[in-house]
Image: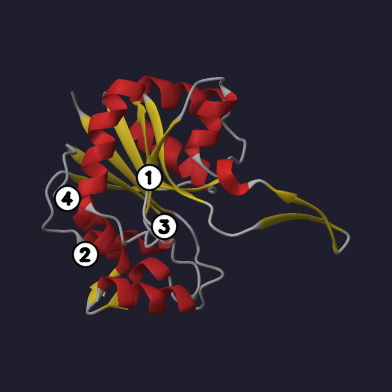
Amino acid sequence: MKINAIITAGGTSSRFGNNNKLLEKINGKEVIQFTVDAFRYANVDKIIICANASIKEDLQRIFKDYENIEIIEGGQTRQASVYNGLKADKCDYVIIHDGARPIISTELINICATMVKEVNALSVMTKTIDTIKEVQHGKIIRTIDRSKLYNTQTPQAFSYDLILKAHEKFEGKNFTDDAGMVEELGEDVYVIDGSYKNIKITTQSDIELAKVYLG
């Protein structure tokens, strides 16, 4: 059974500042390298990075000595980038992860790699711990029962044929995560408990928090 990892790196980091957040260094190591290294030592056969064209050469330099890694150009949206990754190499199962989530463990990746063979579609998630309010026009309408609410993270893992089918059907749309596409097909997606440390770096303050976790 061949398992590929697709790592999204196609964004422009518009909310981060002048530099691409994936190239920001923490303790002398780029954010994207922390992410890739977690997969490098996991039970995956190949890593495909779907990169923004502006950083493709940087990534080729960073990962020039890595084996079983392919760097391709991403698309205009996250969804398009993942679709490019799926078309780049056929496999049996695929684990999809945000390049901007560097605080991911090899152990959790391996759990995904094992469980996806049983359920065909899964997402790492955390239970919502804040009280959630529905608001309209600046006024609270109701308090939502948080006992059934989860925050979506990555990795997400799927059988290759299932996620490819979803991308083919919804090509050109703008889904924010792959699990949502599979849900729209009417297929079940299962949950693996994630970590509250598995943050997605979006702003400079997220880098400071990542330094604490990775330190």
Q: CA distance from mark 3 to mark 2?
A: 14 Å
Mark 2, residues whose alpha carbon is within 10 Å: few (<14), some, or many (≥20)?
few
Residues at badges 1 and 4 in contact (C-beta under 8 Å)? no
In screen coordinates, is 14 left or right of 45? right
Q: CA distance from mark 1 to mark 4?
A: 22 Å
Which labelled disc corresponds to residue 61? 2
Q: CA distance from mark 3 to mark 4?
A: 23 Å
Is label 1 or label 3 in front? 1
Mark 1 or 4, nearer chain start: 4
User: Which residue, given by chain and number where applicable, does mark 4 sit on?
Assistant: 40
Position in image of residue 205 (x %, y %)? 47, 78
Disc 3 is placed on an element classified as helix
Question: Residue at the spot x=15%, y=59% of the render?
Answer: 64
Disc 2 is placed on an element classified as helix
The residue under label 4 is which amino acid type?
Arg
Question: Residue at the spot x=43%, y=27% of the render?
Answer: 163
Q: CA distance from mark 2 to mark 1?
A: 34 Å
